[in-house]
Amino acid sequence: MRYSLEDLFKQAVIDNLATILDSPCWEARMVYGCKTSKDKETGHIAIFNTTKGGDFYQELVESEVDIFYSLGWRQGVYIISLDNYKRKLDKIEKLIRKEMNGRQNPKIITSLKSHRARILIKYNTITNKLNHE
């Protein structure tokens, strides 16, 4: 099935995991770092990745939106969330290697490893949800 932006927004509105972020100007829902909003005046719908850097949430690129179009809201959220966790894990791995080859501060290394473990738990939780829904 191919979903439209309107279908995806409706799915987000009824998603019991979604946080409600409504304002007088828009309706918005967020789950696992993915936010969708609908402008009340224009009806424009957008999907954002809230974990990519910058001062403002970044709207998903076309290939990421295609995931939502083909899989629906919740499955799309899971896929984007897993990509975000992979990106975080890669960053942590680089920081661990840098610290191991540099100062070798045990507190920093321990902190990075525990952060990696927390991210891995979240990654595995989302993977299980993706495989069982």
Image: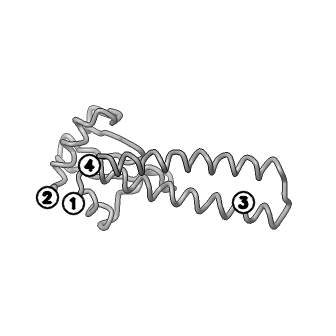
The residue most toward the front is: 132
Amino acid residing under circle 4: Trp
Q: Where does residue 21 sit, x and y in percent of width and height? A: 34, 34
> Mark 3 and mark 2 in contact (Cβ < 8 Å)?
no
**In the displayed structure image, the side of residue 76 where residue 69 appears, left or right:** left
**In the displayed structure image, the side of residue 8 where residue 116 appears, left or right:** right
> Mark 2 and mark 1 in contact (Cβ < 8 Å)?
yes
Colour convention: one colour
Residue 73: assigned label: 4
Q: Earlier in the sequence, mark 1 or mark 3?
A: 1
Residue 96: assigned label: 3
Q: Which residue is mark 2?
A: 1
Q: Earlier in the sequence, mark 2 or mark 3?
A: 2
Q: Which residue is mark 1?
A: 70
Task: Please tell me whether residue 83 is drawn above or below residue 39 in the rendered image.
Answer: below
Amino acid residing under circle 3: Ile
